Image (cartoon, rainbow, N blue to C red):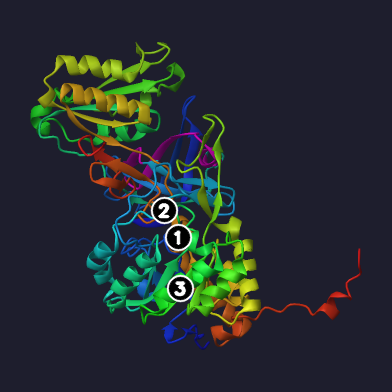
Amino acid sequence: MYDESVTIIENKKVNAEYYKLVFASKHLSQKVKPGQFLNIQMENHEGLLLRRPFSYYRVGGKKIEILYEILGRGTALLAEKRRGHALKALGPLGKPFTQKLNGKKRILVAGGVGVPPLIFLAETAPHLTSPRESRGREKEGLVLLIGCKSKSEVLPRRELTKVKGEILYSTNDGSYGRKGFVTVLLHELLENEHPNSLFIQTCGPNAMMDAVMKLAEEFGVEGEASIDERMACGVGACLGCVVETREGFKTSCVEGPVFSFAELV
Amino acid sequence: MAKVDLTTKIGTLIFKNPVTVASGTFGSKDEYARYLNYERLGAIVTKTVTPKPRKGNQMPRIFETPSGMLNSIGLQNKGIDDFIENKIPYFKKIKTHLIVNIAGESIEDFVALAKKLDREKSVSALELNISCPNVKKGLEFCAKPELTYEVVKAVKDTTKLPFFTKLSPEAHDFLGVAEAAIKAGSDALSLINTIRGMAVDVEKCRPQLANVFGGLSGPAIRPIALRYLHEVKCEFDIPVMAMGGIMTAQDALEFLIAGAHLIAVGTANFVNPKATMEILGGIEGYMKRKGYASVNEVRGSLRIKEASEDRSVPAG
């Protein structure tokens, strides 16, 4: 874990919903796994007091990409930053998504802030079988379901070219992909496959994840969810970001943000 | 240039420097150990421990406000027995003072906690939290001087450990409460705990915190903390651990100059895990620049104009 000053290489609007932030750091890019995050300080504390947590979107060499939406004062401030501006970033923090699924098919269910870490996972997840056996069958091992409000949120194709599997979209207004919530897509998928052969990994709005977990329980499918709560320290000290689990409150910054469905109440 | 002397004494306790951390902002064990060397701190103050485990309050528990944050954690902790078994041993080999912050709902609770900790060799001092705004009865012992006196006296009669009594600016008779704590034998005071505040989500028309109220900390309360410190130092001869929005060395120096013995860094730890080390470095730098050999020369160096000097300022 490192706390470093970084210089913005790029910070621009990707579509109606997302902005992409790019910077480089030797330390913050080391041994990063999908589901982990950075706690980023945008300004000297006089501008904005606390840091804001952001999932890693992509890591290539020293280059780190973050995909974010404007959700409040912190992200609005971040969107105003330009190339050459400095930020302070603490990371990599948190427990990542499970990488090896022992042959199970990976069902990724994403929405909003949950889209970037699941694209990261979809790009880097180990293959269903050994790379040699899986050649030409890569799509079988992974499905990425993305729920949006409308077409304007759908990511440009260039952002998704490295995903090792099928991508299905749903939009609330039906302007792109299937009409309705992303759980419509998940329901169909669960109906057609054996529950023991699947593993769900989800990140997004709480209401979406609750619906995903309910379906998973109904069909008897295991999985894990990345929970994001308001966070201050990011290191397990303040106990501000706790999540209710079967073993009591756990910190989403250190003991999470990824929790198994079985752990969550 | 010669090294500056930061040694700070409170009664029989000798602190290598005046920089410590505010309870609740530094965890209970090794949460910050990968970011800084604990032995460079004058002392470590742990998160409040209670007689029994406490689950804490519901989420959301925190919210950022202008230059501050509201928290309503609700003293989440695993209780004193777990603390003694699993947290204290970690500090055995760490060469700095361990100050354990304790809270209870009754005098018996405080006494029981003090009794258990009195036996622990790694513990240098206690801090009585009689001012938590986030739990039922949290502020009760701070409400009236008589109640403060009773609880402090009971702890004094129980333990040989020196202790700080942490007060809330929300006490109606603040100086009365401070005086009661001192008279009952508190070795020092800790000023100030957070101040209750509130924020509303206007889209959902709901409070931003599940607990509705939360304790406000951060730079927003710094001037208030400084004022209480000054008031207490004017009135009583008692060492104070000061806290309230200390983010930088300059902030820390304000409190030292106003007479604080120790300065506790709180919310700043959340923003910058190395805040304490930067503040320590900054205090040393200031002392060298000003030609101070000892931090005792900085402490209480506040100069306030005499009334006669004030008259030289034209009125109106």
Instruction: Estimate how packed mark 1 is, as few (under 14), some (14 to 19) or many (20 or more) residues with alpha carbons within 10 Å.
Output: many
Q: What stretch is highlighted in magenta?
A: A56-78
As drawn, the residue found furthest toward the left would be A133
Query: Residue A148 appears at what percent x and percent y?
Result: 40, 21
User: Are discs 3 and 2 less than 8 Å apart at CB?
Assistant: no
Q: In this view, does A260 lie above or below B307?
A: above
As rendered, which of B141 and B211 lies closer to the eye? Answer: B141
Task: Tell which subunit mark 3 falls on.
Answer: B
* Labels 3 and 2 in the same subunit: no
Q: What residue type is labelled 2?
A: Cys
As rendered, which of B131 and B282 lies closer to the eye? Answer: B131
Q: Disc 1 or 3, which lies upstream in sequence?
A: 3
User: Are discs 1 and 3 less than 8 Å apart at CB?
Assistant: no
Query: Residue B173 appears at what percent x and percent y?
Result: 61, 65
Give the labeled residue for mark 1: B269
Q: Residue at 25% across / 25% down in the picture?
A: A214
- CA separation, marks 2 and 1? 7 Å
Disc 1 is placed on an element classified as helix
Give the labeled residue for mark 2: A233
Query: Residue A50 appears at what percent x and percent y?
Result: 49, 50
Residue A192 visible, this angle: yes
- Confirm whether the magenta stretch covers residue A77: yes
Q: What residue type is labelled 1?
A: Asn
User: Are discs 2 and 1 less than 8 Å apart at CB?
Assistant: yes
Give the labeled residue for mark 3: B152
Image-based side of A51 in relation to B95, left or right: right
- CA separation, marks 1 and 3? 29 Å
Q: Is residue B200 above or below residue B173?
A: above
As rendered, which of B254 and A15 lies closer to the eye? Answer: B254
Q: What residue type is labelled 3?
A: Val
Q: Nearer the viewer, mark 1 or mark 3?
A: 3
